[in-house]
Amino acid sequence: MTPASRAEVPAASRIVVKVGSSSISGENSDQIGPLVDALAAAHARGAEIVLVSSGAIATAIPFLSLDGRPTDLATQQAAAAVGQNVLMWRYQTSLDRYGVLAGQVLLTAGDLENSTPRSNAQRAMDRLLALRILPIVNENDTVATHEIRFGDNDRLAALVAELIGADLLVLLSDVDALYTKPPHLEGARRIEHVPYGDELAGVEIGSAGRAGVGTGGAETKVSAARIAAEAGTAVLITATPLVAEALAGHDIGTWFDPVPPRHTAERDAPLA
């Protein structure tokens, strides 16, 4: 059931949660535990949960003795290969506390743009969820090139939500909601609700996050929210430490209404 408001979130049956690099790497790597606690609680009540997780490259930085995020493609690919392994180990170790098994799913943009690999990905995801496995999705940075990348995992999460027909997409970051201007500026106000089709006129949306290890920001989250909403998925944007409250239906973050069912029917109706 697609929730019509935050209060209906606990009734959502298929949920995609996206977490950014800065939230689960470096000094914030200890946030993986509370994140898993929240995901496991939703899983235990019967929801099908998919986690879209950035962080492979950022996780590898200390293991490769790098000063920061690498800028050349080859080193990014190598770091992704190392970091993805460590990241999955951390997630599975935490999920073991609940007896939940994770499944790694690595995708490129081409996988969701072309019909055959898209169909294969959809079938695999549906089967993983039917087996009560928690898929952990990331961009396949080890083989992706600049020309075929998603650009950020917010967009990837929206496309995954569309792929599997998710009821809800939760986009997590280091900011608790969208604001009328960057939240550190005087006069910034939280945007509680974005009706379907609202262009957010007059809102100053920044293009980068506060940390230097990710690629997304408020701009990418708004774009992703619109992709998901157009596909019929409700969207909630909030901060990673608030994920338990988000999945419990508390009044936090910024809520994006999905396309109304009538609009969906009109859009998908065959031409006369």
Image: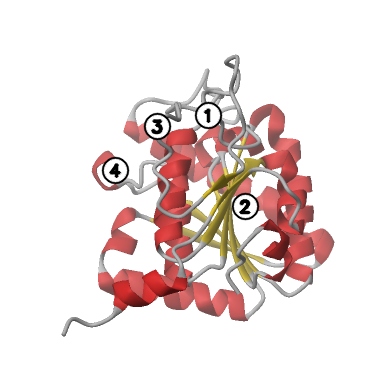
What residue sits right under mark 3 in the picture? 75
Which type of secondary structure does the marked residue at label 2 adopt?
A: helix
Say few, some or many: other residues with alpha carbon within 10 Å of mark 3 (under 14 / 14 to 19 / 20 or more): some
Which type of secondary structure does the marked residue at label 4 adopt?
A: loop
Which type of secondary structure does the marked residue at label 3 adopt?
A: helix
Residue placed most toward the observer, 155 or 21 = 155
Give the label, 1 or 4, closer to the camera. 1
Q: CA distance from mark 3 to mark 2?
A: 20 Å
Say few, some or many: other residues with alpha carbon within 10 Å of mark 1 (under 14 / 14 to 19 / 20 or more): some
Q: CA distance from mark 1 to mark 2?
A: 36 Å
- Specify the amino acid type for callout 4: Thr
Give the label, 1 or 2, closer to the camera. 1
Q: Earlier in the sequence, mark 1 or mark 2?
A: 2
What residue sits right under mark 4 in the picture? 145
Residue placed most toward the observer, 93 or 218 = 218
Depicted 178 relative to depicted 187: above or below: below
What residue sits right under mark 1 in the picture? 180
Q: CA distance from mark 1 to mark 4?
A: 35 Å
Q: Earlier in the sequence, mark 3 or mark 4?
A: 3
Q: Earlier in the sequence, mark 2 or mark 4?
A: 2
- Specify the amino acid type for callout 3: Thr
Residue 94 visible somewhere in the drawing: no
Q: Residue furthest right?
A: 97
- Specify the amino acid type for callout 2: Met
Mark number displayed over residue 88: 2
Q: Earlier in the sequence, mark 3 or mark 2?
A: 3
Residue 177 visible somewhere in the drawing: yes
- Specify the amino acid type for callout 1: Thr
Give the label, 3 or 2, closer to the camera. 2
